[in-house]
Each structure stands twice: as C-alpha cells, then as structure tokens.
Image: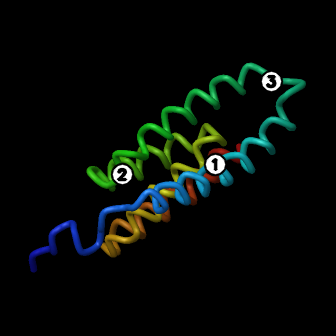
Amino acid sequence: MQRPPAAPYQPALSRWGHAWRFVAMLIISAAAFAELGTSVWDSHRWVIPIDLSLGVFSYIAVHFRRRWPVAIAVLLTVVSSFSASSGGPAALAAVSLATRRIWSEVIGIGLLSLVSVQVYAL
C-alpha cells in the first residue's frame, strides 16, 4: 500500500500555528529547566551552559521535523536525555511524528522517550 503524499497529514502551518507551537515548546522547556536550575545551581553550575547549548541546538533542529520526522524525533529524544531545555522541542517532534500515524514509529519513539526520561533522572 502506497503512502499518501505529505500534504494530507502535513498541511502548511500558519503564523498562528508556528506561534502556539513555539510557545508550547518554551513552556515545556522552561518548566523542565527551572527544576534543573534550582537543583544544580550551587553544586554543578557548569551543567547549565551545556544544557542551554543543547537546548538552542534542539530549537534549531526541530524546524526540520517535517522533512526528516523520524530522524529529528529520535535525535531530539536522545538529546533530551541530557538536556532539560530540549524537552519542548523533543515533545513537539514526537507529537509531529505521531501525526503520521505509522504505529511502529509511534511505539518506537514512545519507548525511546521512556528510556530517555530514565536516563535523565539518573
């Protein structure tokens, strides 16, 4: 069975569509980073610039999620294992991947996300 072209499940996004996705990513990332910042500020302050650098990388990479949905979702999920500020872009990439409704990809990224959360918790 042939897959439909990208247009039916990836319509063009309006400015509003881009804006609310960006705000949602910021809220998720800010919530995760606030927790990190309070826990490591006194003892491991050097982690914060690394985390923010990975976050900036993730915010740039998430713009390519429509061209390479699986690769970007996997990459950002792995990066979010080590960076709280990457949580927002990783969540958007996973949800974007889920809109394709290819169950093997959805289950795979879901399992990888579970592993990522456990690695981050360590």
Whether the residues at callouts 1 and 2 have beta carbons within 8 Å, the answer is: no
Quadrant containing the C terminus in the rendered view: top right
Q: Residue at x 15, y 73 (%)?
A: 3
- Give the mark nearer the N terminus: 2 vs 3: 3
- In the shown orientation, is residue 32 left or right of residue 92? right
Circles 3 and 1 in contact, beta carbons < 8 Å: no
Please, what secondary structure does the residue beneath circle 2 have? Answer: loop
On screen, residue 60 versus residue 11, left or right, reads: right
Q: Position of residue 108 (x, y in %)?
A: 40, 63
> Crowdedness of circle 3 by 10 Å Cα count: few (<14), some, many (20+)?
few
Q: Nearer the viewer, mark 1 or mark 2?
A: 1
Residue position marked by numbered label 1 in the rendering: 26
Q: CA distance from mark 2 to mark 3?
A: 32 Å
Q: CA distance from mark 1 to mark 2?
A: 17 Å
The amino acid beneath tag 2 is: Arg
* Amino acid tagged 1: Leu
Q: Which residue is mark 2?
A: 65
Upstream in the sequence, badge 1 or badge 2?
1
Name the disc covering residue 44, or none.
Answer: 3
Please tell me whether residue 71 is drawn above or below residue 102 in the rendered image: above
Task: Tell me the quarter of the image containing the N terminus.
Answer: bottom left
Taking the image as shown, residue 8 lies to the left or right of residue 69, namely left
Establish if 43 lies above or below 94.
above
Residue that extends furthest to the left in the rendered view of this protein? 2
